[in-house]
Image (tube, rainbow, N blue to C red):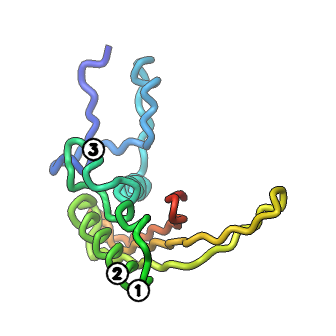
Amino acid sequence: MINHLPITVPFTCEIMSDYLYNKPFRLKNILENKDLLEAELGKSISQNLQLIIFTRFGEHRHNRNFGCEIWDLDFELIVSETIWEERFRQSLLRSITDYELRIYQVEVEIKMSEVEQTFSVRNVTEIKKKVDITIRGKINATGEKYFFNTGLFLSPLSS
């Protein structure tokens, strides 16, 4: 049995451990008394950013402010893409500034587009809204440039 496991979750603690664990955690390793897989700093930051993006405000039971507004905006009627993009950008920037303290000089870029998908088996064409998210910053520990990019499809939200 493991008596002490130094797992630190960045968004719930102000003091961070030297250990950065790969997500998702493989709990089977703990039960078999093996070490959890560690992640390098850049990957750990990216995983935390993904967690921020995919967490709805109020969903995290220990911190109701963790997450971003994408879930509230996803089903909102988009009257102006520019206003929608800016509202999401500001929400994400606030959350990153509050919950990813390992990067600074953070810039967030949001770009919405329409993507057409054709499913030949069903002979159906589908048009979905796609949101491209680009995050740039610098890593506190090293001063290195940091870059993160992902794309999400809206209604229903998917990656």
The residues bearing labels 2 and 3 have C-alpha atoms spaced at a distance of 29 Å
Q: Would you say the residues marked 1 and 2 are in contact, meaning their CB atoms lie under 8 Å apart? A: yes
Residue 59 on image: x %, y %? 29, 47
Residue 37 on image: x %, y %? 44, 37
Dividing the image into 4 quarters, which one contains the C terminus?
bottom right
**Secondary structure under badge 1?**
helix
Q: Nearer the viewer, residue 69 or 36?
A: 69
The part of the image, by quadrant, that contains residue 52 is bottom left
Q: Residue furthest left?
A: 14
The residue labelled by disc 3 is 9
Q: Is residue 8 above or below residue 113?
A: above
Q: Would you say the residues marked 3 and 1 are in contact, meaning their CB atoms lie under 8 Å apart? A: no
Disc assigned to residue 11: none
Mark 2 or 3: in front is 2
The residues bearing labels 3 and 1 have C-alpha atoms spaced at a distance of 34 Å
Disc assigned to residue 82: 1
The residue labelled by disc 2 is 86
**Secondary structure under badge 2?**
helix
Q: Residue at x 35, y 63 (%)?
A: 72
Residue 69 on image: x %, y %? 32, 64
Dividing the image into 4 quarters, which one contains the N terminus?
top left
Q: Residue furthest top?
A: 1
Badge 3 or badge 1: first in the primary sequence: 3
Q: Is residue 111 above or below residue 157?
A: below
Q: Nearer the viewer, residue 50 or 55?
A: 55
Q: Is residue 72 above or below residue 36?
A: below
The residues bearing labels 1 and 2 have C-alpha atoms spaced at a distance of 6 Å
Instruction: Kindly identify the amino acid type of the residue bearing the numbered disc 1.
Output: Thr
Badge 2 or badge 3: first in the primary sequence: 3
